[in-house]
Image (spheres, rainbow, N blue to C red):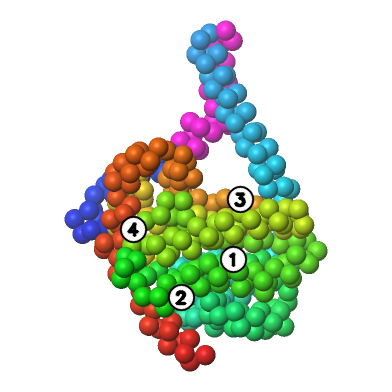
């Protein structure tokens, strides 16, 4: 089921899929692409235009600017994240928390079909029952004893893990005054403490891997923005981003062969935010999990560290806190970020609670 589909009145509109990100994507492979930019002065020259003609000089300057920007991006990537590690999928053991549905399931299926050994940890059974190359382990990541037990079992079954994707999350979607303490504790335990438990369980084997390993942390753009009715979720995601950055700094000094990927997407069209409507479909479109999956897989395959943030506003979110306080309030009102959860329905946690009691 597509939980992000537009209201019935908008489904047939030709402009429904149009967004700022789509326009930028087209520009990035055309007007903003260095290769395409150099075609313009070459075309002018083919028409015997002189080198000192204004259109020729302008087109060369634009192409040179884009080329320098592209080179600067490569240099920035190398300095920020170091050289890429060698990745051989036949030798990789990938652990994905919260991999029974949504983004986690997509990543699991991609790597399972490509020959990697994939272990999915979740309290819910996999949506499609099973997937090729994927082994399911029922595990509540908020329970450190279960995580430790499953970690030992994975090492026996599949071998020492080399890639960890911390993706598990739950959403309460209620005002703080309506949240009871057990709900808050479970949210923080799953969304934040669970990452500590899995890192303590799997990081030792990742750091021992001869070719290094990769740590992927799935946080959220809300780690920078916050939002009404999501106090517990945003607090956990902010802690998760801080955890990732601190761990990345530690690994850079002690284990430089381990790469770290931080994922901070906008609203995903998954059951986690069932019912939530994007305040502005043009400026803040709902993100399809396959787009985030593609970016995460590309970073892991290339053996590089990265920050994956989509759509455009998610990449710009860290600059929000630089704005004066009054402009921040105006930006929040215009964006509607604090009203989006009013239509939230979510998925029931009853099944998770029953499964936890059964364990």
Q: Does label 1 or label 3 sit earlier along the sequence?
A: 1
Say which element carries label 3. strand
The disc at residue 186 is 2
Residue furthest to the right: 210
Pick whichever, 123 or 324, lies toward us.
Answer: 324
Nearer mark to the viewer, of 2 and 3? 2
Nearer mark to the viewer, of 1 and 4? 4
Q: Dot 3 corresponds to which residue?
A: 306
Q: Which residues are magenta?
A: 26-52
Q: Residues within 10 Å of mark 1 (few under 14, many from 20)?
A: many
The residue at 41%/55% (across/down) is 226
State the image quarter where residue 74 is shown.
Answer: top right
Q: Does label 2 or label 3 sit earlier along the sequence?
A: 2
Say which element carries label 1. strand
State the image quarter where residue 57 is shown.
Answer: top right
Q: Residues within 10 Å of mark 3 (few under 14, many from 20)?
A: many
* 236 part of magenta stretch: no
| Residue 94 location (% of width, % of height) | 64, 69
| Residue 337 location (% of width, % of height) | 33, 52
Q: Does label 2 or label 1 sit earlier along the sequence?
A: 1
Q: Does label 3 or label 4 sit earlier along the sequence?
A: 4
Say which element carries label 2. helix
Cα distance between the residues tagged 2 and 3: 29 Å
Q: Dot 1 corresponds to which residue?
A: 165
Q: Does label 2 or label 4 sit earlier along the sequence?
A: 2
Cα distance between the residues tagged 3 and 4: 29 Å
Say which element carries label 4. loop
Q: Dot 4 corresponds to which residue?
A: 228
């Amino acid at each position: 089921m597509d939980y992000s589909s537009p209201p019935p009145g908008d489904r047939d509109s030709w402009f429904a899929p149009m967004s700022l990100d789509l326009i930028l994507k087209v520009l990035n492979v055309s007007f903003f692409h260095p290769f395409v930019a150099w075609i313009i002065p070459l075309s002018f020259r083919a028409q015997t235009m002189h080198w000192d003609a204004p259109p020729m000089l302008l087109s060369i300057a634009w192409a040179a600017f884009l080329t320098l920007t592209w080179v600067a991006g490569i240099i920035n990537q190398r300095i920020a994240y170091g050289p890429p590690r060698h990745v051989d999928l036949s030798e990789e053991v990938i652990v994905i928390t919260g991999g029974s549905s949504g983004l986690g399931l997509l990543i699991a299926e991609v790597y399972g079909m490509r020959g990697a050994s994939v272990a999915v940890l979740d309290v819910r059974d996999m949506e499609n029952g099973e997937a090729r190359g994927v082994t399911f382990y029922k595990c509540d990541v908020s329970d450190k004893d279960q995580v430790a037990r499953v970690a030992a079992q994975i090492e026996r079954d599949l071998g020492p893990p080399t890639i960890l994707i911390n993706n598990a999350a739950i959403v309460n979607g209620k005002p703080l005054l309506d949240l009871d303490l057990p709900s808050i504790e479970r949210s923080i335990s799953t969304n934040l403490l669970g990452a500590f438990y899995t890192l303590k369980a799997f990081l030792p084997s990742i750091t021992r891997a001869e070719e290094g390993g990769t740590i992927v942390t799935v946080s959220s753009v809300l780690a920078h923005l916050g939002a009404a009715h999501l106090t517990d979720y945003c607090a956990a995601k902010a802690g998760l981003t801080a955890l990732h950055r601190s761990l990345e700094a530690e690994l850079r000094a002690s284990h430089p062969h381990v790469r770290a990927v931080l994922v901070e997407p906008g609203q995903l069209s998954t059951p986690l935010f069932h019912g939530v409507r994007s305040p502005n479909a043009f400026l803040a479109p709902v993100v399809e999990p396959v787009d985030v999956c593609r970016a995460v897989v590309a970073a892991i395959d290339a053996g590089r560290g990265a920050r994956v943030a989509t759509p455009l506003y998610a990449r710009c979110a860290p600059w929000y806190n630089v704005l004066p306080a009054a402009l921040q309030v105006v930006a929040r009102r215009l964006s509607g970020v604090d009203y989006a959860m009013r239509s939230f329905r979510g998925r029931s946690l009853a099944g998770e609670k029953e499964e936890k009691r059964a364990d």
